[in-house]
Image (cartoon, coloured by chain):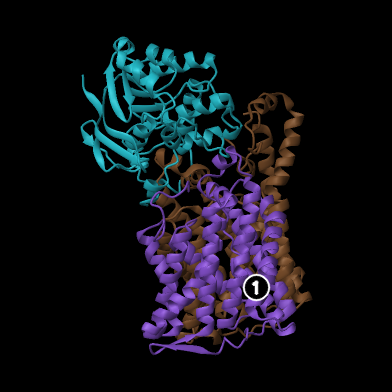
Chain colours: A cyan, B purple, C brown
Amino acid sequence: MTVILEARGVSKRFGGIHALDGCDIEVAQGTISGLIGPNGSGKTTLFNVITGYERVREGEIRLDGRAITNMTPEAVFRLGIGRTFQLTRVFGRLSVMDNMLVASQHDASWARRAFRKAGSHGERAKALELLEFVDIARLANEPAATLSYGQRKLLEFAYVLMADPEFLLLDEPAGGINPSLINTLAERIRALNKEGRTFLVVEHNMEFVMGLCHNVTVMHHGRTLVSGDPETVRRDPRVLDAYLGGVGEDEEADGADGAGAPGAPVSDES
Amino acid sequence: MIQAVVDGVLTGGVYALMAAGLTLIFGVMDIINVAQGIFVVLGAYLSYVLSVHLGIDLFVGLLITMPAMFVVGVVVQWVFISRLGERERTAMSILATYAIAIMIEGILGLVFSDNYVELNAWYVTRSYHVFGFYLPYIYVFGFVLAAVLLGAIYLMLYKTRFGASVRASLQDRSAARLVGVNVDRVATITFGIGVAVTAAGGMVYGATNSFNPNTGYDLISRLLTIVILGGLGSIGGALGAAVCMLVLEDVVAVVWSPVWAPFVFFAALVVVLSVRPTGLFGRSSARAQ
Amino acid sequence: MRRVPSVVGGRNLKAGGLAAAMAVLIVFPLVFTNPTVTSIAVFTLLFMASATAWNVFSGYTGYVSLGHATFFGTGAYLFAIVAMRFNLSAGSSLFALVPVAGVAAMVVAVPFGLVALRTRRHTFVVITIAVFFIFQMLAFNLGITQGSSGIQVPTPNWSPWTFNNPFYYVSLGIVVFATAVSYFLRRSVLGLQLLAIREDEDRARGLGVPAGKAKLTAFVLSALPVGMAGAVYAYFLGQIFPQFAFSPLFDLSVVLMALFGGIGTIAGPLLGALLLESLQQYFTFQFSNGDLYLVIYGGLFLAVLLLLPRGVIPTVTDYLSRRRARRSSAPAARDSLTQPIGEPRTSPIAIVTGKAP
């Protein structure tokens, strides 16, 4: 079993709060891994760090053995890590199709393709196929702002797939969506996993996580508490303690990183 | 040279006051009031009218002009600013206040013409001699006035219930609303206060410079530079940046040439922002956008 | 999909409308020969080009620039300085300097953009104002610009009755060029990326959009037609002064025009400039009082901001599409149930571009 993503000793502070405090995590290639933990345990912050939305001073992230610590979000994406947000972030005034095309990737350098017409035949066909896959193809020409919350989650999932990422990070994919859609979503994730894609999923819906994931990691106070198969994790007394003891304790931290609007690291360059 | 530094500090105090109003408005409302410059000029003209036509002393006149400018601020906020949509609020506010600025400029031009005027009083032309420096009375009086008003703003912010609401709104508007702060009222009063200080700033400015309705452009570009360097929304930063920049400007004027002094002022902005996009004193993690 | 038929119909209509508009613009100075009228037309065209170019950057990215007068002034001064230094004689051949002036504006835009675009939206606005003032100050103080006495530009000895016509057609050419840039950019990969940046810059970066490069490219590109317009302006007036070449009113005007017509659309800035600049020029001829004009202008701006914040074109197209939706009611009805609060029902961009798959 090869490790595709590895984080070692990652620490991140916001003011006085340790959002991540020497966090370690490993994700094996070809698995669906779950990441759970009480509010404020640092799950979304870890996602932000992996995908380049937050910079860290301590710790290292490796993808296929290659260090990707503190890369920009666009570089991380191009390396094949796709990510969805807890609160969906679709481009509201663009059509669903255009949302898909924003994410489509090319081998040609940016300078060479910038002035070409957006959306070749092939790209549009691929986008439609992915929209079919998540069952919102009929909305392709609607502005994304008119989609329901659940449909936006599906759109986010679909446009991330435009770039064929081998590794996907999903932040609460089932949160707030229609229960009937949850099973469809799990099915889609399994199908993609069969194609060889790896998933790391943050989710509060325990049934969803335990049913879907091969492996679950529990975070608490910015650190990894337990990691193992769902049964083991479910039985571990420390996990229950973490949830019972930690409820509401530092919601503030999760609120801060949950919004996922990090200004500083992004404006540092360009 | 040292004279230039002293002058810079003294005039910097007055700019600090005007910039504090601007940055306070931004902090509470996310609004960049581009009309702040023309409000200063308007304040100067009000003092001019009172002193020339009614013979009221400039400092005494502030008892009338500051409340008057407060009312102007409240009216502008209530009639125009509060009606802008939430979307792209900051950008819209820049455009709206810019439009208000050119309207006021036009009105001032119609009433007072484009001729340059100055404010006069017995203390405008006299100076103290201290340790071989010339300290014009008006610079010293202006500095004291600015210090007093800044002190009053500080006390208001940190010692009153209203100040607590303002600080809560500075931190996080929606959270402040949740804990029962009437954010709209706080915004209106803050806007009024932010504009009222321009009456004092305008009086001192008018007594130390000649001005006409176009002077607002020069002022606003300086004030914006100061608040950006100080970090938008940070009052302490605005004070520090105002003094630093005015000292720099005065020193350049002496060492090099007065022609290039304002140029250095803006060049400093460009240089600082290339190194630190959030400003000299800005928090390293900016607010969302 | 259900829109396809109407889009095709719309396309023919649009092409026809475009051809008709072009024909009107081409014959205009031949029909209305009064020099006052054609002179108003030249200014109007220059602003149509400038507002369109401004929109290419600010409209598409959502980063409001209040510093495009920098490019206008750079173009004007480049033209005047080159003509003066090399003692060029007046004539049609002097128009060859117009593209050079545009390129000079682009050269200025590179460092300008590199500094200003490091910051986020509202700091960006303020930096553009500051850089603009730096340039105005330079024009006042440098030797080469001859300070506040300005520069005389050679005037061609064309007949007074047709004097304006060459300026008119060159300006029209710049308008066509700027519109073409705006149109093709809107359909390009870069254009789509710019719109994504406007909606959510961080998210766009997370999908591989190189935001820094994209913004800078658009910024520099938008400087080109503005610099060209500045050069024609200098030539047309025959002299330039710092406060007119680098005018804060120019900055505000292009924003107002784009805002009035509809930011982010292709036709919006054209329409806005056409209406407002011709009106403004008319006012200038009617009342010579500049102060009264400022009051009217400021009032108009505020009225647009408060009453038509989305601009004429999006408001009208929105209304039309709503009517169309009502006629083919069924499919739209379900979506409107899921429509989130606070978002416009229909995207102005989607409509103006007549999205066809």
Q: Total marks drawn? A: 1
Position of residue B15 measured from the top left corner of the image (x, y, whole percent): 51, 71
Query: Can I make out residue C329 in this image?
Result: yes
User: Is A215 left, or right, of B101 in this rendering?
Assistant: left
| Horizontal relation, residue B107 to residue A27: left or right | right
Q: Amino acid at mark 1?
A: Leu
**Residue C289 visible:** no
Residue found at x 40% / y 59%: B281
Q: Nearer the viewer, residue C217 or A126?
A: C217
Q: At which x and y percent is residue B170?
A: 52, 50
Quadrant assignment, res B178: top right
Residue C114 position (above or below residue C135):
above
> Where residue A49 sits in the image (x, y, percent)?
33, 37
| Picture coordinates of residue B79, whole percent (x, y) | 72, 55
* Dot 1: element: helix
Horizontal side of C53 relative to A231 (left or right) equals right
Quadrant holding the N terminus of chain B: bottom left
Q: Chain of mark 1?
A: B
Query: Which residue sits furthest front?
Result: B159
Location of mark 1 (residue): B62
Q: Residue at x 36, y 27 (%)?
A: A168
Q: Quick check: C33 left or right of A243?
A: right
Task: Depth check: give the residue in front, C74 or B262.
Answer: B262
Q: Residue at x 57, y 77 (%)?
A: B204
Q: Nearer the viewer, residue C283 or C24?
A: C283
Position of residue B252 relative to residue A127, above or below, is below
Q: How many neighbours does mark 1 have within 10 angstroms: few (below 14), some (14-19), or many (20 or more)?
A: many
| Residue situated in front as seen by the camera: C15 or C218 | C218
